[in-house]
Amino acid sequence: MRIVVGISGASGSIYGFRLLEKLRRNPGVEVHLILTRMGERTAHIEIGKKAADFRALAAFSYPLEDVSSRLASGSFPVDGMVIAPCSIHSMSAIAHGITSNLLLRAADVTLKERRRLILMVRETPLHLGHLRSMALLAEMGATIAPPIPGFYHKPETVMDIVDHSVDRVLDLLGAPAADARRWEGV
């Protein structure tokens, strides 16, 4: 399985990092990383991680400006793409077909090839323009998966809350985490 992971500059870089950690544990997954400059900056501020820490968890990493990369072509088969976290800026650009960098182009290719595109949009509150962009993306086939945790699994740490959202995204990709805590009913 070949997965593209994009990390934008939205708050919540822990989601992207944790997603990479969990994907790395799955020997059947090859990860291709696109880390934006603002994503790198936010990660350093929020969790003290550097670009090298993210790159170490991916099989391949690409510069944001490399729009001639294989990820910019539909002829390079991937099974899906996740942007975690996804900024409103990135989400809106994707919704309107703006492909000015590799993150946006790879997402555009994912949509045009009818592959899985999952956006962990990290913003609140949302105004009507945000919601309309989300609706456009849903109509194009994207999955909008904001990191909104459930609490039925009785989280005890922040990482339990992060894992809940990341595990849901892994399910959506078809690469479920073996350690995911699931609802068992009452």
Image: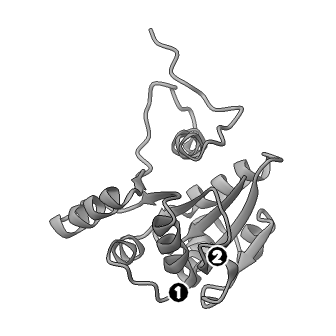
Q: Pointer 1: what residue?
A: 101
How far is the residue under mark 1 from the one under mark 2?
A: 11 Å
- Which comes sooner in the sequence, label 1 or label 2? 2
Q: Quadrant of the C terminus?
A: top left
Which quadrant of the structure image shows residue 177?
top right
Query: How packed is label 2: few (under 14 Cα within 10 Å), some, or many (20 or more)?
Result: many
Residue 127 horizontal/vertical position (percent) = 18, 65
Q: Pointer 2: what residue?
A: 71
Question: Which residue lies at the image location 57% right of the left edge and 56% below the top edge?
Answer: 15
Task: Name the side, left or right, on which 127 lies relative to 176.
Answer: left
Q: Is residue 184 above or below residue 15?
A: above
Amino acid, disc 2 = Leu
- Which of the pair 129/48 is nearer the observer? 129
Amino acid, disc 1 = Asn
CB under 8 Å between callouts 1 and 2? Answer: no
Residue 144 horizontal/vertical position (percent) = 39, 54
* Colouring scheme, one of rainbow, by chain, secondary structure, one colour: one colour
Task: Name the side, left or right, on which 136 lies relative to 150.
Answer: left
Residue 168 horizontal/vertical position (percent) = 53, 40
Q: Is residue 114 above or below residue 100?
A: above
Question: Which residue lies at the image location 58% right of the left edge and 84% below the top edge?
Answer: 37
Question: Which residue lies at the image location 51% right of the left edge and 26% below the top edge?
Answer: 154
Q: What is the total number of numbered labels drawn onto the structure image? A: 2
Label 2's element?
helix
Label 1's element?
loop
Residue 179 horizontal/vertical position (percent) = 70, 32
Q: Is residue 73 above or below residue 7?
A: below
- Which of the pair 127/176 is nearer the observer? 176
